[in-house]
Amino acid sequence: MLDTQYTNELVCPYCGHEFSDSWEREDRGEFECYECDKNFSFDTDVTRLYSSERDCQLNGQEHEWEDTRELSRGTWQKCKNCDQTNFLRHKE
């Protein structure tokens, strides 16, 4: 049995041909494989991922920076209370 569920590309369930141009297809429909000439139906599943960060300033507080990495042109800093970072350039 061929693996045709939740793949990165559209896969023909008859011959296993993988279509590298899958992103050009509609979200669902019917398709004729140009390798084996069989018709099949397909669906597209989309996953949405979220990222969030704490931010002192959005809550009316000041950042409390601490140096985390020293470079020749500046210093990376990270706030002790939230997820924000800052690059402090050295004055020339």
Image (tube, rainbow, N blue to C red):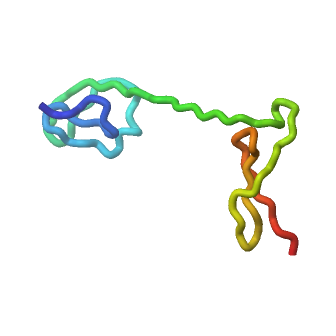
Is 90 placed above or below 2 here? Answer: below
The tally of labels here is 0
- The one nearer the camera, 89 or 81, is 81
Residue 8: horizontal and vertical position, in percent?
A: 34, 39
Is 87 placed above or below 79 here? Answer: below
Q: On the rendered image, what quadrant is the C terminus found in?
A: bottom right
- Tell me which residue sits at (72%, 58%) in the image: 76
Quadrant of the rendered structure where residue 54 is?
A: top right
Residue 17: horizontal and vertical position, in percent?
A: 20, 42
- Tell me which residue sits at (80%, 36%) in the image: 56
Residue 87: horizontal and vertical position, in percent?
A: 76, 58
- Tell me which residue sits at (35%, 39%) in the image: 22
* 58 horizontally vs 19: left or right: right
* 26 horizontally vs 16: left or right: right
- The one nearer the camera, 86 or 5, is 86
Quadrant of the rendered structure where residue 39 is?
A: top left
Q: On the rendered image, what quadrant is the N terminus found in?
A: top left
- Tell me which residue sits at (81%, 33%) in the image: 58
Quadrant of the rendered structure where residue 75 is?
A: bottom right
Residue 57: horizontal and vertical position, in percent?
A: 83, 37
